[in-house]
Amino acid sequence: MSTALIIAIVIVVAILLVLAVRAARKRRAERELERQRLSEQAGGHRNEAEVHASKAQEHEQAAQEAAERAERERQIAERHGSKADDLEQKL
């Protein structure tokens, strides 16, 4: 082989190695950007889920209070009904 051919092969291999390294770095940077984007998106979803959980807890508490109020009113209605029955029997 001639010296020029060997030098040409070495240069081509070196260029290919440099291109391969650059491509690998570019892919790594793209993956990192995608990971960051997904991480931010996941954080947004977590925040939204926390807001929904908080609202659900508030609604649950309101429903519990309404159920307790309804039970108290039912008991009052029963007492009034009993008093009405007693008054009717006395008449």
Image (tube, helix red, strand yellow):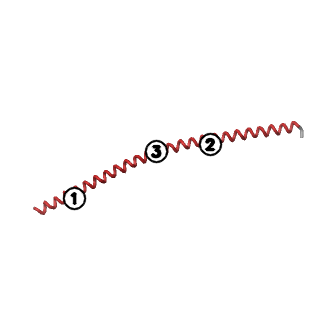
Mark 3 lies on a secondary structure that is helix
Lateral position of residue 5 relative to residue 15, left or right? right
Q: Which residue is mark 2?
A: 31
Do tag 3 and tag 1 residues touch (Cβ < 8 Å)? no
The N terminus, quarter of image: top right
Q: CA distance from mark 1 to mark 2?
A: 69 Å
Between discs 3 and 1, the one toward the N terminus: 3
The residue positioned 69% from the left and 41% from the top of the image is 24
Q: How many marks?
A: 3
Q: CA distance from mark 3 to mark 1?
A: 45 Å
Q: Amino acid at mark 3?
A: Glu
Secondary structure state at the residue bearing disc 1: helix
Disc 2 packing (10 Å; few <14; some 14–19; many ≥20): few
| Residue at far left of view | 91
Which residue is disc 3 drawn over?
A: 48
| Residue 53 point in image, percent of width and height | 42, 48
> Residue 36 vs residue 55: left or right?
right
Mark 1 residue type: Glu
In three-dimensional space, the C-alpha distance between marks 3 and 2, rounded to whole angstroms, equals 26 Å
Residue 79 in the image: state x and y as whole percent.
Answer: 20, 58
Which residue corresponds to the image point at 39% horizontal and 49% vertical from the top-left?
Answer: 57
Question: Callout 1: 10 Å neighbours few (<14), some, many (20+)?
Answer: few
Reply above or below: 8 against 46: above
Query: Where does label 1 land, which residue?
Result: 78
Q: Which mark is residue 67?
A: none
Amino acid at the residue labelled 2: Arg
